[in-house]
Image (cartoon, rainbow, N blue to C red):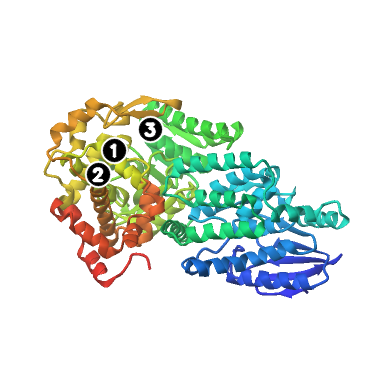
């Protein structure tokens, strides 16, 4: 035994080879925390002091190493810049010591090697990975950049162009592609991984592999045509700045550090990387994105706990075979949960099957499925005009027209055709689940299951608990949503549930701004600059003006104090003209079929001019005031949803808006946005608009939070 710690053990193999095995205790995966870093440092020092001929680094876990334990380093990232730089220098000294060992070093990569895990591999002389391994630098997705030498060693090993792609996208890359890109030296079947790594060590010891060349390549400046390299960086940075603007600076900052380090040796290049890391790690954007990582883990953990004791549905059914029903059927079939798709007309079934077939065809075109796999998935969808087979269904998703009378009739009808204990759900966006349950004999077996359109793209499913929904019903519905690859959030019943309840005050603020003379395209410009993927006018066109009109009626009835308006809104105006947005070819914008048949918007001056009759104000509202009025209305409703118990935590409130509505990720969600501004500052901002009505009145609880200096996130 050369070294024995809690997380690392170094043993001596035949031939004088040291085998460093990572096995972090009390966890299913290796991650860099202080324990693993400290033991890695100690273990490498013991190896350096020994007489071993080579070093093999392996993992005893299913994955090699998944990067840094973000939770354990949150306090580290909040250090002063000098202290953070000192910490980074200490960590990099460990990797440098591995790289500087005068003996061959090989990493045998099983499973995933991400972030710091991949950077550890790059510090070795050679790397061999299992055929099913995945490698990558995901740091930019957390608003940071590689900090343990990734931007230094990657371009020197694999070339600048490929390193730029790896670092800027943060996408994991399969082993065969990593081999082709030059970051690996070999790929082996999983059962032969370690023996292949040992053979690579033997080749190095015989001199068939040049370890000195590998080391020199990594510690010297990048080789190649300087002007060509400069052009690569310029083009990549310009593309990123156009795509992300200033909202997501991590990738651009990482590439600038790589570019600056291009002509530097290892020491100078690491210093450049560390400066970039320290700048990013201490930013608000990084803090928000890291919090979202924790939020995502929380949601997954909560779902796992909820479904621990239930069996996931193995046979599903959907009622209604339109675009939504076809999308649900496709998603279920894709995830290998057979589904009956029922409609009252053959034309509807044909549309639903065509929608599912089109979506599967796209998977084939993108190389994600074979034709045979697509055919098998499509065979998981059983079209039906009657209830044959419904007695064997575990869960039913009702997705008929958004009309409570129709929904109640359909739900009562299907209840009579299903076995006792089958779960019934309604894919409604606004209608009360408790009210719909009144049509059922067993309301305990009923809840809401609100998918977002388009179903294959949108990750969120709202699972809505009615007053009589049982825990078992909620758990089985969450299990089905999880089996479909969706992220379920359990919400309590109220008009609009979570996402639409928060969205429609935002639309209300938009309508008030139009009334006050602000042009809709100006509001879109301001809110897209804020970070929304589309402004409110464009979003309304996508949602459908008729859908928005219906939802506004529901919300006005449910919350008349703040969501019933005493003026004719622009949504009323367009609905009366039958300008329904993309579905009719005209709403706020005009639409024509573009590439791939997707509707492309164009601005039409006559549409804008027609709205002048609604505008009674001067229109002299600053960009800042537009942004504040829109965001105050939305954020206050998010606060009310939390206070009313519609969701249990701020995490679920924020993630619902991010996953279901596209709230700007870099801002962390509406409640995190309030935290970042400071609750007292937000309350003061809201009070500046109090004369606009109850939509802008802070709640008593929020005012109390402001007075006490409390936050939504501790």
Find numbered disc 2 in the image and state the secondary structure of the residue it sits on. Answer: helix
Find numbered disc 3 in the image and state the secondary structure of the residue it sits on. Answer: loop
Sequence order check: which comes first, mark 3 or mark 2? 3
* Residue where numbered disc 1 is placed: 540
Q: Are marks 1 and 3 in contact (CB under 8 Å)?
A: no
Q: In this view, does 429 lie above or below 613?
A: below
Q: Alpha carbon of mark 1 to alpha carbon of mark 3: how far? A: 21 Å
Q: Do the residues labelled 3 and 2 touch (CB within 8 Å)?
A: no
Nearest the viewer among 689 and 646 is 689
Nearest the viewer among 682 and 226 is 226
Residue drawn at point x = 72 percent, y = 69 percent: 44
* Residue where numbered disc 2 is placed: 507
* Residue where numbered disc 3 is placed: 322
- The answer to whether residue 155 is seen in the rendering is yes
Q: Alpha carbon of mark 3 to alpha carbon of mark 2: how far? A: 27 Å
Q: Position of residue 657 (x, y in %)?
A: 35, 51
Residue drawn at point x = 73 percent, y = 66 percent: 20
Find numbered disc 1 in the image and state the secondary structure of the residue it sits on. Answer: helix
Sequence order check: which comes first, mark 1 or mark 3? 3
Nearest the viewer among 250 and 556 is 250
Judge left or right: residue 320 versus residue 705. Answer: right
Judge left or right: residue 89 versus residue 509. Answer: right
Q: Alpha carbon of mark 1 to alpha carbon of mark 2: how far? A: 8 Å
Q: Do the residues labelled 1 and 2 touch (CB within 8 Å)?
A: yes
């Amino acid at each position: 035994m050369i070294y024995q710690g809690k997380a690392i053990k170094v043993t001596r193999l035949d031939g004088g080879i040291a085998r460093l095995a990572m096995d972090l205790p009390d966890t299913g995966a290796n991650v860099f925390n202080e324990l693993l870093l400290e033991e890695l440092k100690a273990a490498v020092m013991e190896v350096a002091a020994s007489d071993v001929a080579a070093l093999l680094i392996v993992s005893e876990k299913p994955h090699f190493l998944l990067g840094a334990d973000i939770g354990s380093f949150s306090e580290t990232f909040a250090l002063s810049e000098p202290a953070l730089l000192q910490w980074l220098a200490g960590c990099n000294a460990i990797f440098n010591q591995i790289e500087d060992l005068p003996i061959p070093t090989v990493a045998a990569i099983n499973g995933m090697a991400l972030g710091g895990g991949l950077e550890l591999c790059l510090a070795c002389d050679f790397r061999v990975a299992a055929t099913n391994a995945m490698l990558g630098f995901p740091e930019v997705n957390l608003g940071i950049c590689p900090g343990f030498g990734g931007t230094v060693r990657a371009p020197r090993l694999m070339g600048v162009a490929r390193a730029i792609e790896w670092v800027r996208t943060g996408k994991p890359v399969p082993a065969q592609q990593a081999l082709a890109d030059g970051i690996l030296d070999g790929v082996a079947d999983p059962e032969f991984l370690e023996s292949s790594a040992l053979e690579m060590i033997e080749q190095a010891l015989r001199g068939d592999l040049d370890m000195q060349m590998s080391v020199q390549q990594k510690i010297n400046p990048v080789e190649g045509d300087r002007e060509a390299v400069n052009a690569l960086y310029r083009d990549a940075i310009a593309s990123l700045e156009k795509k992300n603007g200033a909202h997501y600076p991590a990738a651009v900052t990482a590439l600038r550090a790589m570019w600056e380090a291009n002509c530097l040796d290892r020491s100078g290049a690491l210093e450049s990387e560390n400066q970039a890391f320290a700048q990013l790690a201490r930013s608000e954007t990084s803090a928000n994105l890291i919090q979202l990582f924790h939020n995502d883990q929380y949601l997954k953990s909560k779902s796992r706990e909820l479904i621990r004791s239930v069996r996931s549905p193995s046979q599903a059914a959907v009622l209604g075979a339109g675009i939504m029903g076809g999308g649900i059927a496709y998603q279920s079939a894709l995830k290998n949960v057979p589904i009956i798709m029922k409609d009252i007309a053959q034309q509807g079934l044909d549309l639903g099957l065509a929608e599912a077939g089109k979506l599967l065809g796209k998977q084939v075109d993108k190389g994600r499925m074979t034709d045979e796999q697509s055919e098998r998935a499509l065979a998981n969808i059983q079209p039906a005009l009657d209830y044959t087979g419904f007695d064997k269904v575990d869960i039913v998703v009702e997705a008929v027209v958004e009309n409570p009378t129709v929904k109640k009739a359909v739900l009562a009808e299907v209840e009579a055709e299903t076995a006792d204990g089958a779960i019934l759900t309604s894919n409604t966006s606004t209608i009360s689940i408790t009210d719909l349950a009144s049509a059922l004999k067993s309301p305990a077996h009923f809840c809401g299951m609100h998918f977002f359109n388009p179903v294959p793209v949108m990750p969120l499913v709202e699972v809505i608990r009615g007053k009589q929904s049982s825990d078992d019903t909620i758990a089985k519905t969450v299990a089905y949503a999880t089996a479909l690859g969706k992220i379920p959030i359990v919400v309590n019943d109220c008009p609009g549930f979570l996402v639409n309840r928060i969205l429609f005050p935002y639309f209300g603020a938009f309508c008030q701004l139009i009334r006050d003379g602000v042009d809709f395209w100006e509001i879109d410009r301001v809110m897209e600059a804020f970070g929304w993927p589309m402004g409110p006018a464009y979003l309304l066109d996508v949602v459908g003006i008729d859908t928005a009109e219906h939802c506004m009626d529901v919300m006005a009835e449910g919350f008349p104090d703040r969501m019933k308006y005493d003026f004719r809104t622009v949504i009323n105006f367009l609905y009366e003209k039958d300008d329904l947005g993309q579905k009719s070819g005209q709403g706020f914008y005009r639409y024509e079929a573009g590439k791939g048949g997707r509707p492309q918007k164009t601005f039409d001056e006559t549409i804008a001019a027609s709205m002048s009759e609604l505008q009674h104000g001067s229109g002299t509202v600053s960009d800042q005031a537009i942004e504040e009025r829109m965001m105050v209305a939305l954020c206050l409703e998010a606060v009310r949803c939390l206070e009313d118990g519609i969701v249990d935590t701020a995490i679920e409130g924020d993630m619902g808006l991010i996953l279901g509505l596209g709230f700007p990720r870099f801002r962390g969600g509406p409640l995190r946005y309030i935290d970042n501004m400071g609750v007292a500052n937000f309350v003061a901002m809201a009070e500046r608009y109090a004369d606009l009505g109850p939509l802008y009145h802070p709640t008593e609880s929020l005012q109390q939070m402001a007075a006490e200096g409390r936050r939504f996130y501790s």
